[in-house]
Image (cartoon, rainbow, N blue to C red):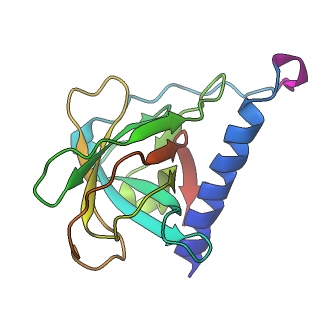
Amino acid sequence: MTRRLAVLALALGAVILFLLSSVSASATAHRTVAQTKPVATCAPTQITTALELLTLGKLPTSPAGAVLFHNTSGTACSLRGVPTVGVLNQAGQRIVVYQRSSTPHRPQAAVLQPSSSGKAAGSSLTWSSWSCSPGSYTLTIRFPGWSTSVAATWGSIPPPNGPCAVTGATIYVGPVATITH
């Protein structure tokens, strides 16, 4: 239950961030950020993923949640920005969806310590006009600078159930953020 609350909080926070990012520049508040030592960018081979989605409301057309990232290497690494999300059907064919991102003016790096630390990172996902059942599709994730994608594995969803063929759907992807669970 705690993990589901963390995923929901991350998703709702991203929606709020997206809404606030559309406010005019004159209303933008200035923030002071402490300077920290840079950490190398995570390579796709250093992370594992877990996809957690919840249905918002009574209709299954607007699932929301997050893709969670864990560092499986022995050294800290970081992720920054909004990943590109690819959607594939059960046959591995690309499903065309529109992606909208909420990118802060100065995206902060999410530092992932080795997996024993209990810290992870996540990017929120919110769908619009989605009609595929959980498990009937897979996601691929690619961060800026990566030459390959990683598959997002289903966290607590059963195996694929039925075909997925959808048109006109939009996925809203939030910037990566550090989370503790």
Which residue reaches farthest front? 167
Residue 67 quadrant: bottom left
Which residue reaches farthest top? 26
| Pick the front one: 130 or 123 | 130
Quarter containing the C terminus: bottom right
Quarter containing the N terminus: bottom right
Q: Where is residue 62 in the image (x, y as percent from the top left)?
A: 53, 62
How many numbered marks appear?
0
Residue positioned 66% across, 22% down in the render: 105
Residue positioned 53% across, 35% down in the render: 101
Residue positioned 50% across, 54% down in the render: 127
Q: Is 28 included in the stretch rendered in magenta?
A: yes
| Pick the front one: 162 or 155 | 162
Which residue reaches farthest left? 91
Over which residues does the magenta segment extend? 25-30
Q: Is 145 included in the stretch rendered in magenta?
A: no
Q: Position of residue 13 (x, y in %)?
A: 68, 52
Would you place residue 16 above or below residue 10 in this image? above
Horizontal side of 59 relative to 98 (left or right) equals: right
| Pick the front one: 103 or 119 | 103
Would you place residue 37 above or below residue 13 in this image? above
Would you place residue 181 above or below residue 72 in this image? below
Q: Position of residue 96 (x, y in %)?
A: 30, 41
Horizontal side of 74 relative to 79 (left or right) equals: left
Horizontal side of 181 relative to 71 (left or right) equals: right
Q: Position of residue 110 (x, y in %)?
A: 52, 40
